[in-house]
Amino acid sequence: MIDLKALRENPARFIEGAKRKGVDVDIARLITLDAERRDLMASQEALRAEQKRLSKETGPKLGKLMGQLKSAEGDTKAAIEAEVAAIKAAPSRLKDEIAAFDGRINAIEPEINALHLRIPQPADDDVPVGASADDNVELRTWSPDGYDLGRSFEANRGFKPRTHLELCDRHGLADFPRGVKLAGSRSYVLTGDGMRLHQAVLRYAFDLMVQENGFTPMSVPVIVREEAMIGTAFFPGGRDQAYHVEESSRGGGHDLFLTGTGEVGLMGLHQDEILDQADLPRKYVTVSTCFRREAGAAGKDTAGLYRIHQFEKVEQVIIDVADEHASREHHRAMIAHVEALLQRLGLPYRLLQCCTGDLGVKNADMIDIECWMPGRGDEGPDGTPAGAFGETHSASRLYDYQCRRLNMRYRPGGETGKGATAFCYSLNNTVAASPRILIPLLEMHQNPDGSVTVPEPLRPYMNGRARIG
């Protein structure tokens, strides 16, 4: 979430930021409610100060008056008795007035919190302004030697490409009918070498991050409380994409949600903690099963392995000090890790600078990486696909947006237990999501006879196999 102090100081920045992201949220209403709450709290604090002052003065004052009362008569006695009664009644009156302010503050808190959670992180100034993914900007492309992305697959390789669906069917790599029978649309069962290749990619990506890049391997829950989804900013906006387990309706105490990325668990690990600056940055990597409802994606990529409800993902997360330069350096490094992976696997790709309208609420910046998939794109007169890029990775820079919601802090200077705290900065990026990445792997490494060459880095995880089929 955003810093309310920053909103008060420069509301125009956040109003424009929401507009550029296409987020409809009443920021002016939040500013009004925030001012009202602060006025109420100031009045309440004044009453508490008065209550504290009275508690110090009441005893001596009452003692003096009670002494005077012993010798007082007539109207004087009545006046003293009235003053004593007023002094004794004051604490109760103040207590009631303070409680009344609590009621007024509590009445507006839910609306304040709801609006606060919906205000997006403003995009960085160097992010291009745009309305949707159509306005994203290509930064660069890469392809292995001998493969020209400006020419068709057939022109590059000398034969027409088979789609991953055809290759899966030819080699028994996936069983889509039984997957649908078990779990409905967008479901699948990886079989034989399909499952082996899937596991090989995940293991290679995981080992790359741990052994070469020094990330700490972690396991994370994939079914979490609502607080974790709100804290990582997947809720409230992405609620329709998450699978909801309604435990509260059957006596479970609280509802649970299936996560769509390991990022939720990795970031939630340090919720409500103050980290030691000496231990930053924290660099974590996990392999987790991910679940997405794909709400609103009816009719899009319903066949095959591209847009599915359940998959596995190797995810990298970095938590560090509140330093923009360091955050940008981490961002570049995380992207470089993925580029190294894709280049070693021989998969052509491009980097896209996401525009403001494609960032989502939580990101200050995001770079998408899309792999070239020969079996995608429009079909020519002979039915051969033209090929197209498909998103396989997203690298996000969030500054303190998640950490503020998660109340994840550190002490600048590193003095444990001393001094003011600051909110951490965070970043995340996919390392490999499978089985989607199997699409370019199968299609780019297919051979004229229909067999598929296993990229060399994956062969140790395939018991030395160099070819499928």
Image (tube, helix red, strand yellow):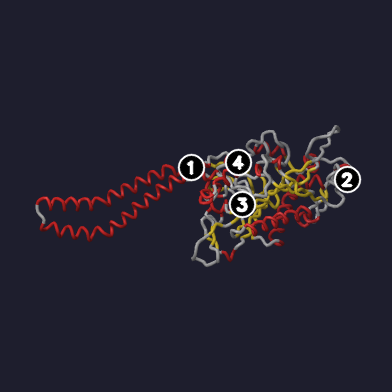
SS at mark 1 in the image: helix
What whole-number distance in Å separates the C-alpha atoms at marks 2 and 3?
A: 41 Å
Q: How many angstroms separate mark 2 from mark 1 (CA)?
A: 57 Å
Depth check, mark 3 against mark 1: the one in front is 3
User: Which one is earlier in the sequence, the residue at label 4 or at label 3?
Assistant: 4
The mark closer to the camera, 1 or 4, is: 4
Residue 198: where, in percent of width, then height?
73, 49
> Which tag, 2 or 1, sits closer to the chain's start?
2
Q: Residues within 10 Å of mark 4 (few under 14, many from 20)?
A: some
Circle nearer the N terminus (3, 1): 1
| 289 sits left or right of 75 in the view | right
Q: Which residue is mark 1?
A: 248
Q: Earlier in the sequence, mark 2 or mark 3?
A: 2
The answer to whether the residue labelled 2 contacts the one labelled 1, judged by CB atoms less than 8 Å apart, is no
Of 395 and 44, nearer the camera is 44
In space, the residues marked 1 and 4 are separated at their CA atoms by 37 Å
Mark pair 3, 1: CA separation:
32 Å
> Residue at position x 20%, y 51% from top?
85
Tell me the crowding category of disc 2: few under 14, some 14 to 19, or many 20 or more residues within 10 angstroms, Cα based.
some
Residue assigned mark 2: 157
Mark 3 secondary-structure assignment: strand
The one nearer the camera, 43 or 239, is 43
User: Disc 3 marks which residue?
Assistant: 398
